[in-house]
Image (cartoon, rainbow, N blue to C red):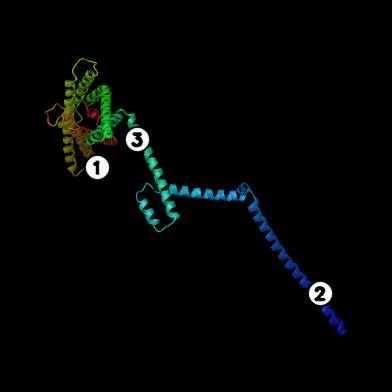
């Protein structure tokens, strides 16, 4: 009986061993199959990478979605940097250089590129505003006259310098002569345009009258005499121009002399008026009861009068140069010096016009040539 029990126990142990071994063989075969399947997948991927066409790999939905997402993210990042950069502040460049001083490689180059790109965008906006201001200036008659006057005297300045220092250089000498001829044509253009300034000057003189609105008597009478000289200047210049154009049979020399004398008289009266106004403004500035706003306004008016004095003195020096020989420094100015004085006066006139402090009678302050 014991032998039968031992035999049955041996059979149960053998059966259990066989079942455990079978399960292990199944597990091992499953692992082997998984490894084999992974190898097959890797070989299939290698085959696809090696044998698939470039068009199929590029048009893969997964690749296209990833590339599209990365491009959108990079575009948003760059645009946010461009709009956030405070390029209008002068201290931004120093702060950005200080922050990126410790960076190396592509980071510094990328930041510098973005800063330069943003600065270029800002400079483009500034250029657009300058262009719009120039167009608005040229659309008005007074602004166009001042621009032509500046170009006229600037051409005479550069042409005089080239003609004087280019004795051995033939090309520079020819360029200087061309600029002088161009300046003469612009001066003639302004003379023709002033044919229609009589009525505007007459309207201004009539509106000013005897200056009853002026507080100081000296300023009032100087302004009246200045308006008379300006009003007489125009017909004298018109007659001289018509004589040179052979429209009338008179000598133009004396009429050019009359117009130059009237122009110089107007400039001298303008200087005296500005000096008187400066004295009155200085007295007002010394008063203690004046507020900050009134003081700043008085200082602004004083700067405007000083600029008017400088402009009139530069034009007066040219007016004396065009007087008959023997009168002070008449006829002694070279072309470049005449151009320098006229350019200085013209630039001051543009500054005053931009500041809104230009004078209505500024049209007479031009070259009689």
Instruction: Name the mark nearer the viewer: 1 or 2.
Output: 2
Instruction: Name the mark nearer the viewer: 3 or 1.
Output: 3
Q: Quadrant of the C terminus?
A: top left
Q: Residue at x 63, y 53 (%)?
A: 50
Q: Which class describes the residues within 10 Å of circle 2: few (<14), some (14-19), or many (20+)?
A: few
> Residue at the bottom extreme?
2
The residues bearing labels 1 and 2 have C-alpha atoms spaced at a distance of: 114 Å
In the rendered image, residue 126, in percent from the top left (x then y), is placed at 37, 40
- Residue 149, by quadrant, is top left
Q: Residue at x 45, y 54 (%)?
A: 106
Residue placed most toward the observer, 74 or 185: 185
| Residue 62 relative to residue 244: left or right | right
Residue placed most toward the observer, 232 or 98: 98
Task: From the image, tell me which residue sits under label 3.
Answer: 133
The answer to whether residue 126 is seen in the rendering is yes
Q: Quadrant of the N terminus?
A: bottom right
- Residue 314, by quadrant, is top left
In the rendered image, residue 78, in percent from the top left (x then y), is placed at 47, 49
Task: From the image, tell me which residue sits under label 1.
Answer: 296
Residue placed most toward the observer, 230 or 78: 78
The residues bearing labels 3 and 2 have C-alpha atoms spaced at a distance of: 105 Å
195 lies above or below 136: above
Of labels 1 and 2, earlier in sequence is 2
Total marks in image: 3
Of labels 3 and 1, earlier in sequence is 3
Q: Which class describes the residues within 10 Å of circle 1: few (<14), some (14-19), or many (20+)?
A: few
The answer to whether residue 215 is seen in the rendering is no
Q: Residue at x 40, y 44 (%)?
A: 120
Task: From the image, tell me which residue sits under label 2.
Answer: 15
């Amino acid at each position: 009986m014991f032998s039968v029990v031992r035999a049955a126990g041996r059979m149960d142990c053998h059966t259990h061993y066989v079942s455990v071994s079978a399960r292990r063989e199944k597990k091992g075969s499953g692992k082997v199959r998984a490894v084999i399947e992974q190898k097959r997948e890797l070989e299939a991927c290698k085959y696809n990478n090696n044998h698939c066409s470039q068009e199929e790999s590029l048009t893969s939905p997964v690749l296209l979605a990833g590339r599209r997402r990365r491009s959108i993210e990079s575009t948003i990042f760059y645009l946010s940097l461009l709009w956030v950069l405070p390029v209008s502040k002068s201290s931004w460049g120093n702060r950005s250089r200080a922050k990126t001083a410790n960076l190396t490689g592509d980071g510094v180059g990328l930041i510098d590129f973005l800063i330069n790109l943003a600065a270029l965008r800002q400079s483009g906006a500034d250029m657009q505003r300058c262009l719009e201001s120039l167009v608005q200036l040229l659309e008005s008659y007074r602004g166009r006259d001042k621009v032509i006057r500046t170009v006229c005297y600037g051409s005479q300045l550069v042409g005089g310098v080239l003609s004087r220092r280019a004795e051995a250089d033939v090309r520079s000498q020819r360029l200087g002569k061309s600029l002088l001829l161009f300046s003469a044509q612009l001066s003639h253009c302004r003379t023709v345009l002033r044919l229609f300034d009589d009525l505007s000057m007459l309207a201004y003189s009539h509106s000013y009258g005897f200056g009853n609105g002026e507080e100081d008597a000296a300023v009032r009478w100087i302004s009246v005499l200045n308006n008379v000289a300006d009003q007489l200047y125009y017909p004298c210049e018109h007659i001289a121009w018509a004589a040179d154009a052979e429209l009338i049979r008179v000598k133009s020399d004396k009429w050019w002399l009359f117009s130059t004398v009237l122009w110089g008289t107007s400039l001298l009266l303008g200087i005296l008026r500005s000096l008187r106004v400066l004295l009155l403004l200085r007295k007002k500035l010394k008063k203690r009861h004046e507020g900050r706003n009134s003081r700043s306004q008085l200082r602004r008016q004083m700067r405007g009068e000083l600029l008017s004095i400088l402009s009139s003195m530069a034009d007066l020096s040219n007016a004396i140069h065009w007087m008959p020989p023997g009168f002070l420094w008449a006829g002694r100015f070279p072309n470049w010096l005449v151009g320098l004085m006229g350019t200085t006066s013209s630039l001051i006139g543009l500054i005053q016009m931009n500041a809104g402090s230009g004078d209505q009678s500024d049209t007479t302050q031009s070259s009689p040539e």
